[in-house]
């Protein structure tokens, strides 16, 4: 979703780019995407609060941690997605890959994984200040399952856009809203 937003903004800002109506449509899509992301995050937070039986104080502290670490995590995830796509482009059958580009992309993927570990470690230190070890472990498990489902939806949507079948986007969204994931 963020990649499309960045691409849309690049096209909007390019001279001779989109018409005013098309720019309004891209802005509307971006606003809808942000609204959907906010709704999903709120729903996830509600489920966490219920399942972990958090106090109001714990919930407020968790929200603060999520607001501070979420943007960092999303930025690294987006960078990793872009690196993987660029690497896939380099590794197309029948096309000679640029050795230097492949090396840099592979190193970037490793760096991104290490950054995600650092983010997780920093976040866990803070969570340990107000969640019990069991609550913290359950929260991490819930978030991991949630992120896996988001990844599946992205891959399904990307597959649909490439004409590779139906994907899983709407079905997974329905399951999420029904509380099954």
Image (cartoon, helix red, strand yellow):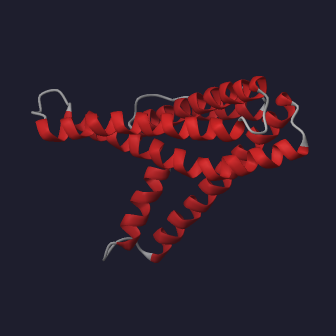
Q: Which residue: 83% across, 28% down?
A: 51
Q: Which residue is drawn at 62% across and 56% down?
A: 34
In the picture as drawn, the residue positioned furthest to the left comes out as 96
Q: Where is residue 31 in the image (x, y as percent from the top left)?
A: 61, 62
Closer-to-camera residue (48/17): 48
Percent position (x, y) of residue 42? 76, 46
Q: Position of residue 61 (x, y in %)?
A: 78, 47
**Height in image: 66 above or below 143?**
below
Residue depicted at 40% across the width and 39% down the height: 112
The number of callouts visible is: 0
Residue 143 or residue 90, whichever sits in front:
143
Q: Is residue 63 left or right of residue 98?
A: right
Q: Can residue 124 be seen in this view?
A: yes
- The quarter of the displayed image where residue 32 is located: bottom right
Q: Which residue is located at x 53 percent, y 29 percent?
A: 152
Asked if residue 98 can be seen in this view, the reply is: no
> Residue 162, percent across and down?
38, 37
Q: Which quarter of the figure has residue 52?
A: top right
């Amino acid at each position: 979703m963020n990649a499309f937003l960045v691409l849309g903004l690049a096209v909007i800002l390019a001279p001779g780019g989109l018409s005013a109506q098309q720019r309004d449509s891209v802005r509307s899509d971006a606003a809808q995407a942000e609204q959907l992301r906010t709704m999903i995050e709120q729903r996830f937070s509600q489920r966490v609060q219920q399942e972990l039986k958090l106090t109001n104080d714990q919930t407020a502290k968790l929200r603060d941690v999520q607001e501070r670490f979420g943007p960092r995590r999303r930025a690294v995830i987006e960078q990793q997605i872009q690196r993987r796509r660029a690497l896939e482009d380099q590794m197309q059958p029948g096309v000679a890959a640029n050795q230097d580009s492949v090396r840099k992309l592979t190193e970037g993927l490793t760096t991104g994984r290490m950054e995600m570990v650092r983010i997780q470690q920093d976040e866990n230190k803070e969570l340990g200040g107000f969640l019990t070890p069991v609550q913290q472990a359950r929260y991490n498990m819930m978030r991991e399952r949630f992120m896996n489902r988001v990844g599946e939806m992205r891959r399904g949507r990307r597959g649909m856009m490439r004409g590779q079948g139906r994907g899983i986007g709407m079905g997974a969204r329905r399951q999420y809203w029904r509380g099954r994931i």
